Amino acid sequence: MKQLLSAFIILGACVHLSAAKHVDGMIGLKGHLPRQRDIDHFMKNQVQSNNFTTGDALKKIRANRAADIKDSFLHAWKAYRKYAYGSDEINPLTLEPVTTRNGWGATLIDSLDTIHIMGLDEEFKEATDKVREINFDKNDGEPSKVFETNIRYIGGLISAYELSNDKIFLKQATALADIMLEAFDTPTGIPWQMWDVQTGTGSSEAGPSTLNNLAEIGTYQLEFFRLSQLTQDPVYHKAAQRVYDVMLDRNVPKKGATYSVPGLYPIFIDIKSGKFLSGKPNLGGGSDSFYEYLIKTWALSGYQLQRSLDMWKESMKGIKKYIVSKGSDKRMYMGIGDDEGLDSISDTFTCFFPGTLALASRLLNDSDSMDLAHDLLLSSYNTFARMPTHIGPENFGFLPDGDDDSDLLATQRGEIKKYGFYLDRPYYLMRPEVIESIFYFYRITGDEKYADWIWEIWQGIKANCAVEGGFAGLRDVRLGREGGLIGKQESFVFAETFKYLYLAFTEPNVISLDDYVFSTEGHPFKRSFSFNGTF
């Protein structure tokens, strides 16, 4: 199957543009290769600050905070090890093992690099032995969500390999990627959303339809690029880049159409036709990591994947014009919008964007983008800071500056007056995006206030979410623990939330942003691998 798929990708069936024009994504949207003088310029741009505050007293405070976070990680890990080791998750309230990601051990693999970074050698060795036992040809009988399999399993294994040099991780990453490549064997090369490894059949999460979404077709490029580098096999990279080939070829922006603004892509796409179907553009769930991977994959490639950079720049024009909006509290928010108008609703997923935009501003030496990233960070942080728990909601809404509030409920108007926004879905599931963006700002600026913001959030999480089995979700961030807990602790709590918390208080050279690119699941990939267009 891998050989057949490789031939299919190289031939570029169903796309009228020649394969040569799209080799590995190095040809930009205007038909040009990256210029060496531009690459040399980008190489000089430093991401992390050189101006971190020093002093023995602060060093001690930071070391104590890092130790506190590490102890809490170990508390959660030991509960998982005791009650659910090798399972996908543990229910932190009932202490029962939970199968959510095919039974391959999502928490085990997603946690590997965090364990390694924290210097937990015994735990890492034991987890490595467990990874050796996994057989990805067998699962719990349910279809695999291909996107989640990539970011949690394949990404986690690649990062563990890069940090430890233990070849079992690369072997297992390659084995699973080869299985998931079968999901790309569609009329267009756009992958199925779900893939049954037992029967070799694809489906949509909603059933037998051929629907997929933007994030779940555009969040392979980072992991598959690196896997092609590590294996010297281009098939993974070509499969991921072919998604762009088809998406761009089959969809031309047209005013009044589903896809109307260049670079602002609708959410839903049909994998058989390659056409966008519906879903107003936004930076939240279903779209978020598509945009994130444009700039990050470009950086990981040593600035060689020109098309990714061009797509990022094109998207940024639309985002600034139609997605970003000033609220009635004068803060800048991210809504859902295109040239037909803005829906002033947002979610915690969008809060990754200030950090990614700040990263992009340093990679590109773009001060204007850094200013916007800061404005967006303030509104994202505010959703946490204004809550009595210091924890923010899953979804929230805002009132655009100058708009009439008569369409809002009285409770929504009251919360906007009190907080600057209203809570739409008030629960919290230990998601990392706000912490992640603040972490980027700390590392990029060296300003200690950002580390203090993270510590404040961490105090809220400890007080409200810590339980015997690890960390539970909150039903209502306005009420905290008293409002009820949710028995859910996804693997990203270990992969992302704890990692960003911890790295905010280590020495800045630990997983430096000048040395690593983080995947959307928080897995660090080394930037030191060279790439010249071949594998």
Image (cartoon, grey):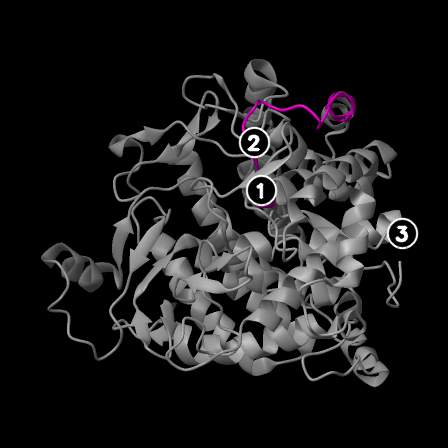
Q: Which residue in the protein does label 3 denote?
A: 232
Q: Which residue in the protein does label 1 denote?
A: 148
Q: Nearer the viewer, residue 293 or 523?
A: 293
Q: Quadrant of the C terminus?
A: bottom right
Q: Secondary structure at mark 1?
A: helix
The structure residue drawn at horizontal position 74% and vertical position 63%, both measured from the top left corner, is 12
C-alpha separation, residue under disc 2 versus residue under disc 1: 8 Å
C-alpha separation, residue under disc 1 versus residue under disc 3: 24 Å
Residue 444 horizontal side relative to residue 525, left or right? left
Sequence-wise, which precedes: disc 1 or disc 3? Answer: 1
Residue 250 is a magenta residue: no
Quarter residue 439 falls in: bottom right
Q: Estimate the x, y position of residue 43 in percent, counting from the top left.
A: 80, 74
Sequence-wise, which precedes: disc 2 or disc 1? Answer: 2
Look at label 3 and name its amino acid: Gln
Q: Which residue in the protein does label 2 denote?
A: 101
Look at label 2 and name its amino acid: Arg
Residues marked 2 and 1 touching at CB (< 8 Å): yes
Q: Quadrant of the N terminus?
A: top right
358 relative to 114, above or below: below
Sequence-wise, which precedes: disc 3 or disc 2? Answer: 2
The structure residue drawn at horizontal position 76% and vertical position 43%, both measured from the top left corner, is 158
Q: Estimate the x, y position of residue 482 in percent, counting from the top left.
A: 26, 31
Q: Inspect this view and state whether residue 122 appears.
A: yes
Quarter residue 281 falls in: bottom left
249 relative to 108, above or below: below
Q: Secondary structure at mark 3?
A: loop
Q: Secondary structure at mark 2?
A: loop
Look at label 1 and name its amino acid: Glu
- Per the rendered image, the range of residues in magenta is 128-148
255 relative to 52, above or below: below
Q: Nearer the viewer, residue 350 or 141?
A: 141
